[in-house]
Amino acid sequence: MSWLVAGALAAGCGPHSIPVPAPRTATSDAPSCLIVADSAGTPRPVTAVFADSADAERARRTDSLEPPVRLDCEGRALHALATTWSRDSSGRFWTIQLDSPSDGTDGPRWTAAAALAAAWRAGAAASEALRLSGVESLLPLDEHRLVVEFSAPRAELPPLFADPALGVPRARPRPTTLDARAPGGDPRDALEGGADLVVSDDPALLDYAGRRPGFTRVPLQWSRGYVLLLPAGSSLGAAVPPDTAAFRAGLARDAVRVDARPAEPPFWWDAAGGCVRPPAPAGVRRSSAVVYPEGDASAAGLAERLVALAGAEGLAARGLSAGRLVAALRTGSERAYVLPVPSHALVPCRAVADWPAGATAVGLVETREHAVIRHGTPPLVVGWDGTLRAPAP
């Protein structure tokens, strides 16, 4: 892809590099990010069961891959594959410096010139994340330094550098590893079967774990939001009143069964207005439905409450399968959509890629999961997006 080719740039030809400390940088995770049972064990592999299979996959990737930086639960940047980073005076050129390759390890040697830039260019997920974040070129300066050129200035460390899509296999093994998996049934059975950790927002599971000896329940980050998405020209009338604070508080209290709170601005999607999205096909007939992802109980509860508040004749809440929901989003064929979104989007344009152009997003609530931890499990840490991982050695 031409936008990732370094072109004629060479070391010393770009704008003069002025090292600028990344905001809120830390050398280790904040103590508040540690997830610890009442009695913590020594480092070892941890069996973790996630009620949401997407959460399990994200945890597997987070634990096995190393991005340039990590963001702890407070949003502070931590060194990972990169040891330092700086921007030039324009804010468009960011230089990341990689750790020195370790000797005597069987793991891969990640160097800027020989491996990392090539891996990003070749990987579909990495290439998409770079493109949607406005990256125009990658320039390896030497074995340790890689310059990333953005189309627009970035005053602060771009969250892109913490995106799992830029993660590469870790060169150094860690004493604690996370064996993340989906439950394949009732997550309570996973606890009885010896799992070290179960992550879920199910009140029944949390109540069950609270009555069992040998477990600790820990609330995780507010990592999932829900938005009401209205295609251009669509409305739910009185369902969304001018007093949105009280409206959101009522939804968090009454419309969902899990741990929830009102969504509060600023919202990351408000800054995604410049993302390019294909226009909805002309002449699409709009339904009288508020649709949501099938199987998402929180989204269903919110959609049903919005339908009740709207009080419009014929308006109904309806769940759609993943494939049908994406198709409906891209065409803007429904009256409204209730969608789960990340509370923090590292690549906002990727997160809104399926939203119809010109749609209006209204933040509704945020939810969080809990970790049920068996006593004796080694400490873990939670990141900015609520994903659990093993601590750095």
Image (cartoon, rainbow, N blue to C red):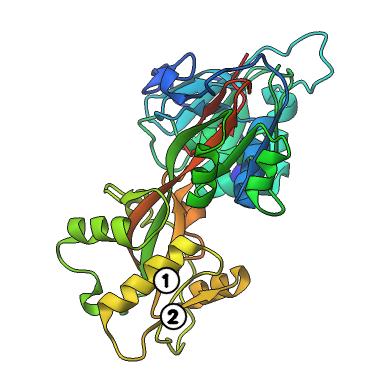
Is 173 in front, or is 253? 253
Which mark is drawn over residue 337? 1
**Disc 1 residue type (three-letter):** Tyr
Q: Position of residue 84 (x, y in %)?
A: 52, 16
Residue contact between numbered discs 2 and 1, judged by CB atoms under 8 Å: yes
Which mark is drawn over residue 48? none
Determine the residue positioned at 43% across, 38% down. Answer: 221
Decide: is 58 above or below 290: above
Q: Is label 1 in a helix, a strand or a loop?
A: strand
Is 391 in front, or is 46? 46
Q: Which residue in the rendered view is the most extreme toward the top?
A: 103
Query: How busy is the neighbourhood of tag 1: few (under 14 within 10 Å), some, or many (20 plus)?
Result: many
Disc 2 from disc 1: Cα separation: 7 Å
Q: Which residue is mark 2?
A: 334
**Disc 2 residue type (three-letter):** Glu
Q: Quadrant of the C terminus?
A: top right
The total number of labels drawn is 2
Determine the residue positioned at 47% across, 50% down. Answer: 203
Please indicate, yes or no, whether residue 126 appears anywhere in the rendered image.
no
